[in-house]
Each structure stands twice: as C-alpha cells, then as structure tokens.
C-alpha cells in the first residue's frame, strides 16, 4: 500500500467519528423531540453532559468535521495508483474500497446532521408561514 493510502485511512476514520459526533449532538435530539420523545433527550443530556457542550458549539463541530471529511476525500482521491505486484495490488484495492465506504458513510452522517441542525427548522417555519 502506498503512502497516500496509509495517510488516508486515519483521516477517513477520524472523519467518520467526528461526523458521528455531529449526528449525536444535533440530529438525534431534534429527531427525538420531533417524535415526541423529549424526555429521552433530557435523559441523554443528563447522562451524557458533553452533548450540551457539543450542541452549544455546533458550528465549530460542523466546520471541523467538514474539514476532516474534505481532507479525507482529498487524500483518498489524490493518488489512486496501486503497486504492480498482484498481492499488494489486491490489498491496496481492498483498502481503497473500505476507505471509500467509510468516507461515504461519514458523508451521509454529516449530511443528515447538517440537514437536521440547519435546514429542518427554517424549512418547517417556511412551510408553516
């Protein structure tokens, strides 16, 4: 596996975990409240108080996770060459596939969190207006 593939893997995992943080801080509470489960949100925030801090600084959470996600995609797509040796080429291709899967999953999670945190409420108010 070449150096760019090795560099891309930690970025992909880091992007996945930071985007999962955006989902937990912003999208999950909004979804639970929408479904009438406000007491579940109260229980979550009392047992996991860091969620309050994350939601207070959600713009920074989204910016950081978005930058990590973009850098993960950049490293992943920058150099897609694999070695000529068949065994190494197969390992390289498998790592690339997993890297792209993780990045797609992280991108999906980030998009859901972004929509829930910044688009859902204005859209609801606009539709009611």
Image (spheres, rainbow, N blue to C red):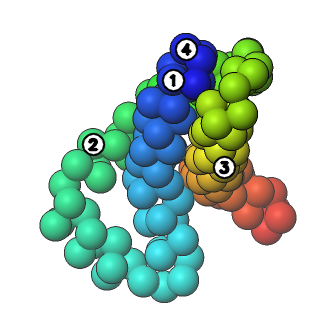
Circle nearer the viewer, 1 or 2: 1
The answer to whether residue 103 of the structure is visible from this angle is no
Element at label 2: helix
At which x and y percent is residue 125?
73, 60
* Mark found first going from the N terminus, 1 or 2: 1
Q: Are marks 3 and 1 in contact (CB under 8 Å)?
A: no
User: Residue 75 falls in which quadrant of the image?
Assistant: top right
Earlier along the polypeptide chain: callout 2 or callout 4? Answer: 4
Which residue carries the number 3 mark? Answer: 101
Q: Distance between the residues labelled 2 and 4?
A: 36 Å
- Tell me, yes or no, whether the two marked residues, 1 and 4, touch with CB atoms within 8 Å: yes
Q: Can residue 112 be seen in this view?
A: yes
The 10 Å Cα crowd at callout 3, few under 14, some 14 to 19, many 20 or more, is few
Tell whether label 3 touches label 4 (CB within 8 Å).
no
> Element type at marker 4?
helix
Report the residue at 16% width, 67% height from top. Answer: 47
In the rendered view, does 124 fall on the left or right side of 5? right
């Amino acid at each position: 596996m070449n150096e760019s593939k090795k560099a891309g893997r930690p970025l992909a995992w880091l992007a996945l975990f930071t985007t999962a943080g955006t989902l937990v801080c912003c999208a999950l509470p909004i979804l639970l409240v929408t479904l009438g489960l406000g007491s579940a949100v109260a229980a979550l925030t009392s047992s996991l108080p860091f969620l309050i801090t994350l939601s207070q600084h959600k713009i920074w959470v989204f910016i950081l996770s978005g930058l990590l996600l973009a850098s993960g995609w950049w490293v992943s797509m920058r150099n897609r060459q694999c070695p000529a040796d068949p065994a190494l080429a197969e390992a390289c291709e498998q790592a690339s596939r997993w890297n792209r899967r993780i990045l797609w999953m992280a991108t999906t999670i980030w998009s859901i969190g972004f929509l829930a945190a910044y688009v859902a409420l204005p859209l609801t108010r606009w539709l009611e207006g």
